[in-house]
């Protein structure tokens, strides 16, 4: 129990975890418990673009798979604001599961174009074949995680989700755009 008297569970779980074994069972156990709960489920994070920073600094070319997949990345600060609202007013959000996205649908190609505009220099995106990406990732990441990621991305390609306005509904504020995030983090790409 906290100083405010709240003794519930608020959990953040990325959509990518839907493909990971065992996590649904954990959430179901929480739902069946007597504890007050709410869940936040962010999709892609804007900060995932930071993995491109070294390549952008060195040669201005982002090489990655799934460049055409449409997602609505969320700024982690917006997710944190939504989580704070759940903690501040838990009774309003009790028993709710909130998918969280950013305000706009973007491909990785479009994110690179936005970064190019913010940096003011040419950048480009090169699609890496899935087999190559799978082999490269498999050297550093457990196979279950690689498979979950590829399943998520294939599903997103075939059935793209929309941009939701959950951040606005929960916080009353406007979710940040990728361009705003890029301007705030531009030093990582210089």
Image: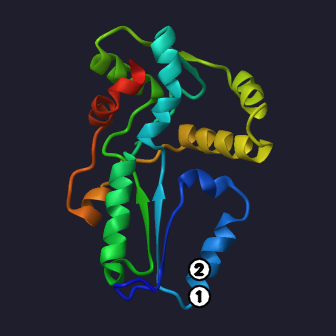
Asked which secondary structure carries label 2, the reply is helix
Evaluate whether residue 187 shows in this view.
yes
Evaluate whether residue 125 shows in this view.
no
Along the line of sight, the residue nearer the viewer: 185 or 19: 185
Query: Residue 121, relative to residue 137: is it above or below?
Result: above
Circle number at residue 132: none
Q: Residues within 10 Å of mark 1 (few under 14, many from 20)?
A: few
Q: Position of residue 173 (x, y in %)?
A: 20, 56
Q: From this viewpoint, which residue is outermost toward the bottom?
A: 34
At x 35%, y 22%, the residue is 115
Q: Is residue 135 left or right of residue 99?
A: right
Q: Is residue 93 left or right of residue 132?
A: left
Q: Which residue is mark 1?
A: 33
Q: Is residue 184 left or right of residue 142?
A: left
Q: Residues within 10 Å of mark 2 (few under 14, many from 20)?
A: some
At x 56%, y 81%, the residue is 31
Q: Which residue is mark 2?
A: 30
Query: Residue 56, relative to residue 146: is it above or below?
Result: above
Question: Mark 2–mark 1 contact, CB under 8 Å?
Answer: yes
Mark-to-mark CA distance, 2 and 1: 5 Å
Along the line of sight, the residue nearer the viewer: 50 or 63: 50
Along the line of sight, the residue nearer the viewer: 97 or 5: 5
Query: Residue 159, relative to residue 62: is it above or below?
Result: below
């Amino acid at each position: 129990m906290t100083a405010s008297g709240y003794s519930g569970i608020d959990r953040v779980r990325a959509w990518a975890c839907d493909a990971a074994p065992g996590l649904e069972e954990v959430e179901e156990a929480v739902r069946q418990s007597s504890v007050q709960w709410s869940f936040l489920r962010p999709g892609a994070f804007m900060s995932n673009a930071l993995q491109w920073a070294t390549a952008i600094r060195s040669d201005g070319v982002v090489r990655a798979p799934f460049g055409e997949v449409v997602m609505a990345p969320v700024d982690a600060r917006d997710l944190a604001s939504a989580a704070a609202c759940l903690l501040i007013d838990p009774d309003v959000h009790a028993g709710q599961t909130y998918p969280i996205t950013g305000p706009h649908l973007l491909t990785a190609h479009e994110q690179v174009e936005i970064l190019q505009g913010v940096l003011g220099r040419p950048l480009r995106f090169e699609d890496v074949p899935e087999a190559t990406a799978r082999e490269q990732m498999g050297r550093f990441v457990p196979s279950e995680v690689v498979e979950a990621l590829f399943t998520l991305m294939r599903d997103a390609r075939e059935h793209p989700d929309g941009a939701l306005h959950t951040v606005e509904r929960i916080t009353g504020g406007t979710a940040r755009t990728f361009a705003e995030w890029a301007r705030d983090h531009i030093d990582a790409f210089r």
